[in-house]
């Protein structure tokens, strides 16, 4: 038994080493060949924890900066690490939610993923928070709440004490940074990249959230979130598509087709 256990541990060590080597190789390739994402270059790589709102395009709560230590790396390497996190968390979500090849195909061939690859935003944060669950993930989830944040309501239904962590984080953020929402320097709601169906989508979003509440389903609540928000960028819908394609496949197929139809119509309109 001792020899078998030792052999298993040795195998785990080699597997871990191989995974780290693979991750290192992926990040290195991205650093040399992946173009710098627009949002990474002009927003997240410029952030400082002390004065995050000196960057005019930064919209997230200030404590989200603490989850981005790779912003301190040289531009190409920080950009590579962030894209590796975006892709890695998407793959992890498909695996954990048992989405299979269909989910992989829908997600990685979707216009919203291409937009995420173009911008290299930080949408891995809320998706990782959703996967981690209420105990470890809620602070990650609320670091970018407009994409999947309604899942927190189902977690709070199970145990209201999970809200203490974000409550303390937000209270501390106001003590440290003052009334930081007033320091946001532009209005994203009226920008051309706002993809939110607000307010038309609110009734359906409320219906999905009600169903999620009755069935105790944080994933259904998560996908209702963009319907309830006045602002969401296209790339932030990638996490929603992951959940849909892994757990609600018929809805995912329709959603996928609607996204592509919208893109085709817009391209033809702009070129016409």
Image (tube, rainbow, N blue to C red):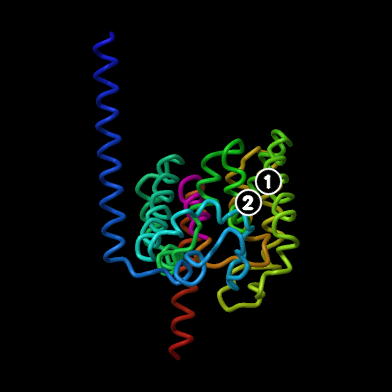
Residue that appears at 50% across and 45% down: 247
Residue that appears at 25% across and 26% down: 11
Q: Quadrant where the N terminus lies?
A: top left
Question: Please, what is the dominant secondary structure of the magenta stretch?
Answer: helix
Query: Which of the 4 image quarters holds residue 49?
Result: bottom right
Name the side, left or right, on which 183 lies relative to 140: right
Query: Which of the 4 image quarters holds residue 196?
Result: bottom right
Coordinates of residue 18 in the picture (x, y in percent): 25, 39
Q: Residues within 10 Å of mark 1 (few under 14, many from 20)?
A: some
Asked whether residue 246 is drawn in magenta, I would say yes
Coordinates of residue 152 in the picture (x, y in percent): 66, 45
Specify the label residue 142 is tagged with: 2
Residue that appears at 64% across and 58% down: 61
Query: Which of the 4 image quarters holds residue 32?
Result: bottom left
Q: Are marks 2 and 1 in contact (CB under 8 Å)?
A: yes
Give 138 or 197, whichever is nearer the viewer.
138
Give 45 or 5, whichever is nearer the viewer.
45
Quick one: SS at disc 1? helix
Q: Which residue extends farthest top?
A: 1
**Up-down: is 92 above or below 29?**
above
What segment carries the magenta color?
Answer: 237-247
Alpha-carbon distance for marks 2 and 1?
Answer: 7 Å
Residue at the disc numbered 1: 166
**Up-down: is 74 above or below 124?**
below
Q: Which residue extends farthest bottom?
A: 272
**Up-down: is 206 above or below 42?**
above
Q: Which residue extends farthest front?
A: 50
């Amino acid at each position: 038994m001792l020899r078998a256990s030792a052999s298993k541990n040795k195998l785990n060590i080699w597997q871990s080493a191989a995974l780290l080597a693979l991750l290192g190789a992926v990040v290195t390739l991205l650093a040399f060949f992946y173009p710098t994402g627009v949002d990474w270059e002009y927003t997240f790589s410029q952030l400082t924890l002390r004065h995050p709102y000196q960057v005019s395009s930064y919209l997230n709560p200030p404590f989200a900066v603490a989850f981005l230590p790779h912003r301190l790396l040289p531009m190409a390497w920080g950009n590579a690490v962030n894209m590796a996190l975006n892709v890695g968390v998407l793959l992890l979500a498909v695996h954990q939610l048992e989405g299979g090849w269909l989910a992989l195909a829908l997600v990685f061939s979707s216009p919203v993923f291409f937009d995420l690859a173009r911008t290299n935003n930080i949408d891995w944060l809320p998706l990782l928070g959703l996967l981690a669950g209420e105990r470890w993930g809620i602070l990650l989830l609320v670091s970018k709440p407009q994409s999947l944040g309604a899942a927190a309501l189902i977690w709070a239904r199970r145990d209201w004490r999970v809200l203490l962590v974000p409550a303390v984080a937000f209270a501390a953020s106001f003590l440290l940074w003052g009334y930081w929402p007033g320091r946001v320097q532009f209005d994203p709601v009226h920008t051309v990249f706002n993809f939110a169906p607000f307010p038309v989508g609110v009734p359906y979003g409320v219906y999905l959230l009600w169903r999620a509440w009755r069935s105790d389903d944080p994933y259904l609540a998560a996908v209702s979130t963009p319907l309830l928000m006045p602002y969401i960028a296209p790339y932030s819908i990638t996490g929603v598509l992951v959940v849909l394609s892994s757990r609600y496949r018929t809805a995912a197929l329709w959603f996928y087709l609607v996204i592509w139809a919208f893109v085709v119509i817009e391209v033809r309109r702009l070129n016409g």
